Image (cartoon, coloured by chain):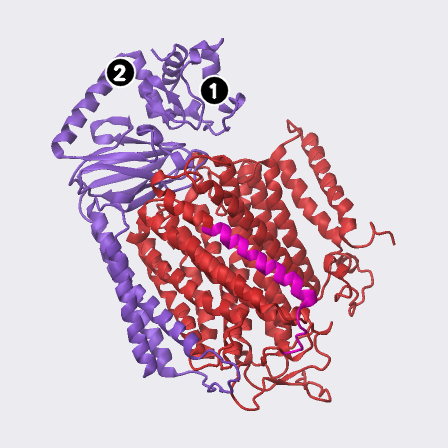
Amino acid sequence: MRLVILGIVGTVVGLLLGIGIVEANVLPPQASEQAVNTDHVYDIMVIVTMGIFGLVTAVLVAALVLFRERRGETRVAPPVHGHHGLEIIWTAIPAVIVIALTGISWKALSDNESGQADMQVTVWGQQFDWSYDYPDLKLTGVHQLVVPIGAKIDFDVESKDVIHGWWVPAWRVQINATPGQTNQLRVTPTKIGTFKVVCTFICGSGHPVMGTNVQGSIPARIKVVSQDDYKKFVDDAVAKAKQEASSPAAAAVAVFTKAGCGGCHTWGAAKSTGSVGPPLDGLSSHPDAENFIRQSIEDPGAEITQGYPDAMPKDFKSRLSPDELDTLVKALAGGSQ
Amino acid sequence: MNVFLRPNLARCLWVTPFTSLIFMSLTLFIRHWVGMTPIYDSQQMLTVGYISGVLGFLIGIGAFDTWFPWMIGAPTRPEDHSQHGAYSWRDYFRFNTDHKVIGLQYVTTTFIAFFVGGMFAEIFRAELAHPGQDFITTQQYNGFMSQHGTLMIFTFLVPVFAGLGNFVIPLMLGAPDMAFPRLNALSFWLLPLALLIFLSSFIFESFEAGWTGYPPFSTTGPMGETLFEIGIQIAGASSIATAVNFLVTIITMRAPGMTMFRMPLLVWANLATSALVVAATPFIAGAQFMTMFDRVFGTQFFVPSLGGDVLAYQHVFWFYSHPAVYIMVLPGFGIISEVISVMARKPIFGYRAIAFSSAGIAVLGFSVWAHHMFASGMEDWLRVPMMISTMLIAIPTGIKIFSWLGTIWDGVLRMNTAMLFATGFIFTFVIGGVTGIWLASVPFDYHVHDTYFVVAHFHYVLFGGSVMTVFAGVYFWYPKVFGRMVDERLGRLHFWSTFIFSNLTFFPMHWLGLEGMPRRVADYDPAYEGWNTFISISAFCLGAGMLFFVYNMIHSARHGAIAGSNPWGALTLEWQVSSPPPIFNFDVPPRVVGGPYRYGEPGAQHAIFPEETVPVHEPAHV
């Protein structure tokens, strides 16, 4: 009897504690449909499991207080070896609870991924930056992700080198960028604003600051805008892409941005502020600037600037076309004008 | 014989480099002979040098002194006990076949790894106390972080239970030793080598892809990564050999009368664990061979541009490394069952349910691996089945928790240090179990995967869970090993500092993960500074509290009160012999007559020692 009352009290206290944790709401802002569904599962799980936690803790603490051996005590414990009824109850009830939790999780998962997508964006992870392609608009190498509110978006996440993890905490979703395959993620943004993107998978010396060049602060940010603003963004971006095709300086910046160089390097012309690798302004003063720059891109390990790690990917020679490489080398060697 | 020729550490000093040099020269010769240029390849030299060095060390220490003559057909003595038992402290630094010596060698070595790994954590917690780069670079951080995980898992938590089991299990079974004593000694001596191999990678730039070593980051990483791969092979071989030994010992060497359901629950737990180790460990060996071949021989298992599959590594890796979580906690469950029943003076509640739940966890443990890969981009359909099996595994774990509560309810609880750790374990482990259920939910995992929430979860399971059980076991069996009692006052201080500061260190990590802090970062959003500073300070206090433990262990071995053979009034067999036990364990073979937990039953006995040794009746062979 004593045990039953204690169990009930412990469970209730645990449930209240669970409600308290849910109410304390430490999660980031809820900015997608997926976040709403996931948080719903989270709330239920927290409350139910905290009930179990309360039960166990109450019985444990009460037992330690009630049955602790006192000095001079001659009490003998009853030689009880078990109780089938109790054992069946504490197998069956947790079984029902975990099956129910599995059910609501499954439901939320399929809701999160249901329906036809309205648009598609490709996310590229690389050491140490993110970039985005809009295949429908033929836009590539966009640095700051801009998406419209309310659209069901399929993100195809890919990597150019090692594994990265693309996580938008406010959207409650993440998926690895795995080289050699395309991983998919569905998001329906429901809030306008800027949200951070975090790399969750260790990818090298730039991992903690991956993508800082976008705003110069940890971490990188993405933008959700209204449908009208999105149209404006699309028009501007398409016009800019056309302009880049005609001016060599702008083309060099485009190559630089698309290749993700700004994740690690500071270069005034591209407004990048990365600090994993050496800054690139003022390279024109090098006695043999063009060859030095070309060598540093094609074979980065050949000559390491003092104070910096040998962290630059070694395969830019194959990632950039000969034309792109020429454009970039000339622009870097000629100063940032 | 000269000290450099006898089998001992002095002989290792020259045999190890000598063997390495022979094999390295042979490699150079072969490369020259077949016309490879250049004839020197640093990766290959490193690999050949280290692996042959391990062989050389084992020859030096005397692992093959019996086997080599036997292999070539030279006469050997089947009843050769010259390598058995500790007569002086020097015997602890030799190839010793006594399971009690090996047990102590194991536990000491693993605790050295624990403290070194802990120091690495303190170093990177110092870096993380404040955002921005303060003491160490990101690369150094990655190195320390990877070493911390690797040492804690492969050279502490997995082998420490092999050490405790080594000392206790043959005694519990009423056996004179393990089934294969020489293999047992060989398994032990591989362990310090694995530890040295991991640590020596600092010389070549430490591996930095974490203890998980995912390619392509690991296959393109610095030279130290190759040493990580070799170290895992060595630690894994040690682990497998010990598990085979436990399986055979438990199945074939039980005292007369000890039926399966009269075995103490630690033995059941070790049986389940050993089965897991034997079945699962070859997978991590395979995974590490493949990454090593990619690095050293230029194979393309995990090179996506050449048709390799990066995800394949993760499946193979976790097919071991999830069961490894149970390898690191099931024996701990066994320890808790022993400690709680003895200290509550009450039979364990639901013996068969606990025994079967160990077996259930071992079986189910093989069907949950991909829950580590929900966010990896694996096949979509795999997610839900893995979520179901992961949720289900909470049931046998819950049965154990409730059974322990049933045991202490109505008991007469002796709240000494071992019991404090056992009950403290229940509290912290339940928190780890609860967050485990949350993480099993795929949509929630999509939010917190690879964040500090996961770091919090597995530290609750592995520190709040496994490490607490290790301490419970160490305090519980210390009087048996040394014949002296530990200082209870220092023990309490150690418990309370560990309990309070581990919670203060690991609990706030849940918050950081939910808010948005990823794991394995040397730097973070300044918004998280407050909790990170708090965590770092708590981690320093947690580390400092370990000094109580170290001092207590060393001091009590000499100055503790004399323990006598059975200070806790326990029924299991290891407590029925002197402390420390005789060199061959039992002067009179015991006969088991009842269950191991018959506390509170007047006059109940688990085993008797017949005055005259009755020859065990062997069934006549036809």
Question: Depth check: B432 or B165 in front?
Answer: B432
Disc 1 designates what residue? Answer: A296
Disc 2 designates what residue? Answer: A245
Q: Nearer the viewer, mark 2 or mark 1?
A: 1
For disc 1, the chain is A
Residue A14: x and y in percent read 30, 66
What colour do you see for chain B?
red
Q: Around disc 2, counting alpha carbons within 10 Å, would you say few (fewer than 14), some (14 to 19), or many (20 or more)?
A: few
Question: Farthest residue toward the right?
Answer: B1
Q: Which chain is purple?
A: A
* Three-letter code, disc 1: Ser
Residue B136: x and y in percent read 51, 36
Tell me: B594 left or right of A168. right
* Three-letter code, disc 2: Ala
Q: From the viewer's perspective, is residue A227 above or below residue A116?
A: above
Check residue B557 in the rendering and tell me which mark sits there, or answer none.
Answer: none
Q: Earlier in the sequence, mark 2 or mark 1?
A: 2
Residue B605 shows in the view: yes
Which SS class for mark 2? helix
Residue A99 shows in the view: no
Picture quadrant where residue B256 is located: bottom right
Q: Which residues are magenta?
A: B538-566
